[in-house]
Amino acid sequence: MRNWSTSAWKLGRQICLITWLTSVAITHTFAQAGTWSTKAAMPTARFGAAVAVVNSLVYVVGGCVSPVGNPVAILEVYDPKTDRWASGSPMPEPRCAGAAAVIDGLIYVAGGYSSVGPTGGRPPVHGIGVYDPRTDTWSTKASIPTTRYGLAVAVVDGVLYAVGGLGSGTGSGRAVEAYNPASNTWTTKAPMPTAREGLAAGVVGGILFVTGGTGSPFPTTLDAYDPRSDAWATRGLIPTPRYSPAAGVINGLIYVVGGASGTRQQVEAYDPKTNTWVTENPMPTGRSGLVAGVVDDVLYAVGGETLHSGPFSVNEAFDPFLRITIDIKPDDPDNTINLKSRGTVPVAILGSATFDPTTVDPATVTLAGAPVVTRPNGVPMTSISDVNGDGYLDLLLHFRTQDLQLTRTSTEAVLYGETFSGQRIRGADAVRIVASDRLLRSNPWTEGPSGRRTLSTD
Ligand SMILES: [Ca+2]
Ligand SMILES: [Ca+2]
């Protein structure tokens, strides 16, 4: 039997009880606005793999290929643009229930076990496996001090944090160790408040959030780690406690997907800003031991198992947003933005046969992190007209250029918002960032809040 799942199965009834007991204490709402779709299946069905995203490609590495375990070294790569899979060089050794993260374009895989012995023993993988997608080659770095599997890893400020998991040492479930690639060394950090194996992690605003997993007692909370102060805080309860879910961060929300509890289809999103949860549409194929990679704000839930079936090759995509079309600077096909301008950037949310932009709540809209310009009374400044003459009304909004979180290398700006009924929307348009001083001198025209051009007096 695979102990990796049976521990969760034993706790199944306990989970239901905990869920019922805690549901009244948790602030969460039901949005159910995101949509699921089925994508090309992974060539090799697996659970307990590790996942990383580099340059919009999803790398799924290692895992177990049979219900009894059988760790593998396989690397398979999914390209969401083409909905196709390719193979990469396998890891130096098999690894199941490890975890991966990306630093400077390299994939670091830590923890896991390399085989399953006849009596259920799981020899640990000691070294970090480092994969360079540019050369399709692997190397091995410093051994993790506390060997463990079913851990989570995450990166904050170029340092990899290996959190929790089940290992040989006592207290492995609370272990936190940080790996610095510059020095190839590990450092011991403050332990988690809650012991967890089969947990999920996400980073928002430099804070590492963990939830899920098994332990003693069964973890029902979401815990937050601040690497700057090396301190943990418990941030409240998760609506559905579960073993071995996957997690992905999209626009500052942590989406926790699947895991052993009930149908294993549950999707819940945590907002660190408000410390609240939203229940999302369930995943079509319920699974635990799956992985999740996020590309262009779409979460790809790949592989996994259940107690009675799997491993799975299934690949299902979750999009939290209604995708809309925007036109940054309707008068300018190049969407030129001078980051030092004191003016505003007009953006049209375009209407269509299927989308009425007047349903958008302007107070919820941001462009590259900037809010909509408001009137002195605080009401967002908006206008409605058919800016592109296609017969559908468009919503014109303005954003202060100096509020935009863009850099000189930005090539795209993303607009997020919600409709008045709570549907999340997302639109993106290309931008061309220009050297500021030169433009100010050569172009005497600046844009006012109305979007109309006025001659600058500079
Ligand atoms: Ca434009
Ligand atoms: Ca229009």
Image: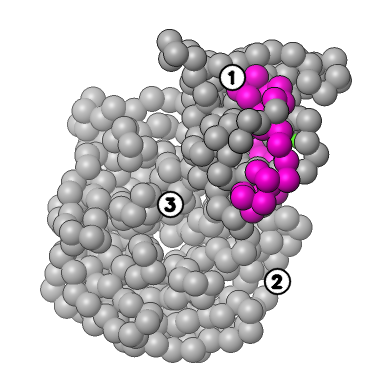
Looking at the rendered structure, the kind of residue marked 2 is Ala
The residue carrying pointer 1 sits among few (fewer than 14), some (14 to 19) or many (20 or more) residues within 10 Å by Cα, namely many
Q: Identify the mark nearer the N-term, 1 or 2.
A: 2
Which type of secondary structure does the marked residue at label 3 adopt? strand
| Part of the protein shown in magenta | 427-454
Which residue in the structure is indicated by mark 3? 247
Please tell me whether mark 3 or mark 1 is closer to you in this view.
1
Q: Identify the mark nearer the N-term, 3 or 1.
A: 3
The residue positioned 19% from the left and 74% from the top of the image is 188
Determine whether the beta carbon of the residue marked 3 sits less than 8 angstroms from the nearest atom of ligand 1: no
Q: Is residue 435 magenta?
A: yes
Q: Report whether residue 119 is seen.
A: no
Q: Position of residue 317 (x, y in %)?
A: 61, 47
Which residue in the structure is indicated by mark 1? 360
Instruction: Specify the farthest residue to the front.
Output: 457
Looking at the rendered structure, the kind of residue marked 3 is Ala
Disc marking residue 86: 2
Spatial separation of the CA atoms under disc 3 and disc 2 = 23 Å
For residue 244, which quarter of the picture?
Answer: bottom left
Spatial separation of the CA atoms under disc 1 and disc 2 = 40 Å
Compared across the picture, whether 416 is left or right of 182 comes to right
